[in-house]
Image (cartoon, helix red, strand yellow):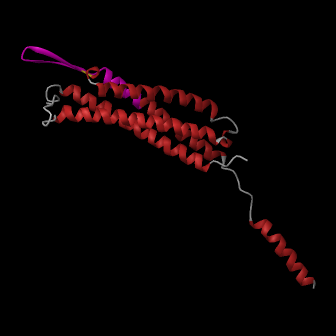
Amino acid sequence: MADAKDSFMLDAKSPKGSFPPPTPQPLSHHKHFLMAHEILRLLAILLSGASIAVMVTNSQTVTIFSFQYEAHYYYSSSLKFLVAANGIVCGFSLLTLIMSLLLLRRQGSLQRPYAFFFLILHDIFLTVLIISGCAAATAIGYVGQYGESHVGWQAICDRVPKFCKRNMVSLFLSYLAFFAYLGLTILMAYKLMSSPPKN
C-alpha cells in the first residue's frame, strides 16, 4: 500500500514540473530587431533622398536643326510622380524613425503589439507608393529608350543620353528604397506575430 501511495504522489507531481511557464522574448532579441528596423528605415531615407537629388538636378540641353531643346524631369508627369513619391517616403520615414527612437526603445514597448500594427500599415502604404512611382518612371523610361512605333512615339535617349542615364540612376535608387521598405514590412509583420499576447 505504501508503494502504491508513493507512486500516486509522484505521478500527481510530475505534470507540474513537465510544463515550464512560457518565457518572454529576451531583451537582446528586441535590441536586434530595433537595430535592423532603424538601419532599414535610415537606408530608405538616404536612398529616396538621393533619388530626389539626382532627378531634380538632371537636365540636358541639345540643339537639333538650330533649335534648342531642354530635357528636364518636370516635363514628364511620371517623373514628377516619382519625385513626389520619394519626397513623401523620405519625409514620413524620417518622422517614423524619430518616433521609433523615442517610443520603441522605452521599457515595456514589447507589450504593445498595436504599435507594430500601425507601423505595418504605415510601411505598406509607403511601399505601395514608392513602387507605384518606380513603375510609372520605368514605363516612361522604356518609351524614352526604345520608343513605341505603334503609337508613333520616338525614342529620345539617343539625343539626350546624359539625361536618360541620370534618370536610370535615380530610378535604381528608388527601387533600392522600395526593397528597404519591403524588408521593413516583413520585419514588422514578423515582430507583430512573435509579440506575446496582452493579457
197 left or right of 15 in image: left
Q: Quick one: 191 or 148, which is closer to the camera? A: 148
Question: Residue 10 falls in which quadrant of the image?
Answer: bottom right
Spot occupied by residue 19 in the image (x, y as percentages of width and height): 74, 64
Number of disc labels = 0
Q: Residue at x 55, y 39 (%)?
A: 35
Spot occupied by residue 102 in the image (x, y as percentages of width and height): 62, 30
Q: Is residue 58 magenta?
A: yes
Spot occupied by residue 68 in the image (x, y as percentages of width and height): 14, 15
Q: Which residues are magenta?
A: 47-71
Q: Residue at x 32, y 36 (%)?
A: 135
157 left or right of 176 in image: left
Question: Residue 69 falls in which quadrant of the image?
Answer: top left
In the picture as drawn, the residue positioned furthest to the bottom comes out as: 1
Q: Quick one: 114 or 12, which is closer to the camera? A: 114
Spot occupied by residue 153 in the image (x, y as percentages of width and height): 15, 31
